[in-house]
Structure formats: C-alpha cells, structure tokens
Image: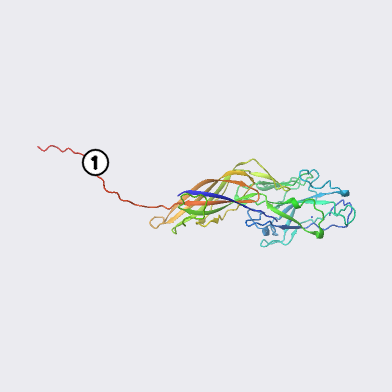
Amino acid sequence: MKKLIILAAIAATALASCAKTDNLYKSTGQGDAVSFGAYTLRTPVSRVGGEAGPQTLAKLGKTAGPGFGVFCYYSDNSGGATTNDYAAGSPSNFVPNFMWNQQVKGNGDGTADPTAWSYEPVKYWPNEYTGSVTDEGIDKLTFFAYAPWVDATASTGAVGSETEGITAVSSNALTAGDPTLTYVIPAAVANHVDVLYADATSLKNLTKPAGNTAVSFPFKHALTSVVFRVQTYIDSQNNTGNLNDQGYDVDTHTTVTLKEVYFGGTLAPSGVLNLATGAWTPAAGASATYSKTGLSQTVTKTKADVTGIEPITLIPQASATYNVRVVYDVVTTDANLSAGSSTVTNDIKNTVTMTLQAGKRNIIDLVLGLYTVKVTASVADWEDADAVEVDLPANN
C-alpha cells in the first residue's frame, strides 16, 4: 500500500517590476527629475515576489510594502569623452555615487498595480552636453535594482543583525565594482524570500531621455523555487509516469490526507548576487532539509497544488538528486471497529533529479500510490492423512 511516485516538471517563471547633479560641463538649466516605472515579464506561471513567499506586482508596489532598492552610478564624461562609461568586466571607474540603496515605493494598496513610484530625495538627470543644446548628452547614469528593499547600514551594507534572508548589500563606500546583495536561505520555509533583480541590459549608460521618460526596471527571479502538487493513484501496478489513466478514485468510505512534506539534499546555504549580471557566487553546498508539517489536505485522483506551504526558494545550482519525503494518512470508516475507523499512516521516501535554474519554478508531483485490500476465498477437498497403526492389547 505504501508507494510514492515522484514526477518533476520545470516551468519557466520570470517576472519583472522602477533619480541635481554637480560639476556640469555645460548646463541648459536644471535637468528633469529622474522618474521610475515598473513592469512584469509575464508567463502563464509567473509569480512576482518581494516579501516572504510569493506575491503580485501589486503587492510589491503597495504603499505599506518595502518596495525595491536602486543603485545608480554617475559617469562624468567631461569634454565629450566616454572614458567613464560603464563597461562589463572593467568596473574600475564605477561607484554608487548617485544613488545607494535608494528605496522606491509604489502608491498601490495591494489590490491593483501601482500607478506611480516615488523616492526621496528626488534626483535630477545630468544636463551636460558636448557643444550645443542640440548635441547628445555626454554624462550618463547606470541603474541597478533589487527587491524587496532592505534597510542597510550605509558604511558596511549590513542589514541590522539579520542572519537570514537578505543580510547585506554592498556598502556606499566609493569602492569600484558592481553592486551585490547577500542572501541566506531561512531555515523555515515560511520565511523564504522571492528575491528579484532588474535585468540591467537596458539600464546602462543612459543619457537624459526625451520627455522625461521613466526608467523602467524589468525584474526577474534571482532564485529558483520548488513547489508541490499531489494526487492519488489507486491500484497502479506499473506506473511509468503517464497519468492520463489515473486509476480508480478513492472509495467513499476512505479519506487520504496529506500531513507533511520534506525536500532536501546538498544545497548552497547562502550566496552573493551580482545585481549587474544576475549571477550568483554560492557558498559551498551543505546538507539541508526544508519541510512543512501540520498540513491537512484531502487528496484525490485529481492533481492539485499542495496548499499551506510557501514555495521553497533556493540558490540555483547544477543538476543533482534530492530527497523527497511525504507523510499521509489513509482513514477508512468502519462501524465494526471500536474507534469507528481505521487509520494507516504512511511515511514514504523517494528521490528526484533536477537542475535548479534561476527564474524557474520546479514542480514536484507527489503521486500517492494506494492498493485496495482484495479478499478471495477457495475451498479445498478433504484429503486423507497417512494411516497410523495402533497396536491394541491382546485380548486373552
């Protein structure tokens, strides 16, 4: 009766959500204020994050929420030079000298996408030109962003005394290099954070836009996530993974209840995320298990999401084999028993091999294989046993 079949499917999940200047070479007057916008790269299974667990872009932009953080690098190219333009792999001139961990908040209430994003103090686009006001601007800004915003100590980048979640961002020290954040996977799944970073491809070396167009940040998932679905499979003799024929449904007298789910293996406990590239520098892998107990989900042959458990968000890593364990009860009503029912608790383990890719939602299908107890009877003919000779006393 105890059988667990695991099927792993990977679904792409991407998402998305977005300023006075000094030492001007030739100014045309005060520049336009830098304004921000945000948008979501939507897919059928996309989930926008930014707090513990999944949330929508609307929630990310709610007034009461943390919003997102912005780093901005100012490239002063006096005289028409491009020496200080941002270039990948050559960050010697690039420091967060225009914005550092700037909090940007939406005006939403959590029920609809926000219509505006704001920050304080307002910054203005550099307004320097090579010759005349018709020339192209030569000073530039490069932006990087992440979510959810965390309040960090500027000189060190440390996030208070936090030991889990986003624990640090790169400091405001004028040390050249891409901005980064440090993430430690929380022990409790309920505290896992859906960390986002903005794809910086279109955010580098920007001159003042025409019409004061907002700078929009296309956010993506920095982490990978693991979620579960569950169903029963009755009287399966040779399940090859094709569940088009899902067998019989559970008998009306019987209820299958999912109680606990465990996922573990060798996983990076923490890592440093480069906000310019989206690449992780993970810590050495260590054995870890993430679990959810106290579930009470009725399971049928119809596949359903496991409820009551947040997505497990992990640092991406190459293909590996992971351990999966589930605990579920099979309760059958029986008036002939003193308790009125029989309860069988099944504690089943199996393994699954997956590649944990950034921005991917890894779906693990838990198929709880059950077998009905079948009763048959047969009657055999009597057979003669071997004769035993008994000597009686002589009768004289």
Q: Amino acid at mark 1?
A: Asp
By what rule are the colours in the image chosen?
rainbow
Residue sticking out furthest to the left: 396
Is residue 345 among the parts visible in the rendering?
yes
Residue 99 visible here:
no
Residue 271 horizontal side relative to residue 135, left or right: left
Query: In the rendered image of this protein, does residue 386 appear above or below residue 138?
Result: above
Q: Residue 120's quadrant in the figure? A: bottom right
Q: SS for tag 1?
A: loop
* Left or right, residue 339 beside residue 263: left
Name the spot of residue 168 as percent of width and height, x first.
70, 46
Closer to us: 245 or 159: 245
- Label 1: few (<14), some (14–19) or many (≥20) C-alpha neighbours in 10 Å: few
In the image, what residue occupies the spot 65% across and 44% down?
270
Give the labeled residue for mark 1. Answer: 386
User: Is 359 situated left or right of 327 in this image?
Assistant: right
The image shows a total of numbered marks equal to 1
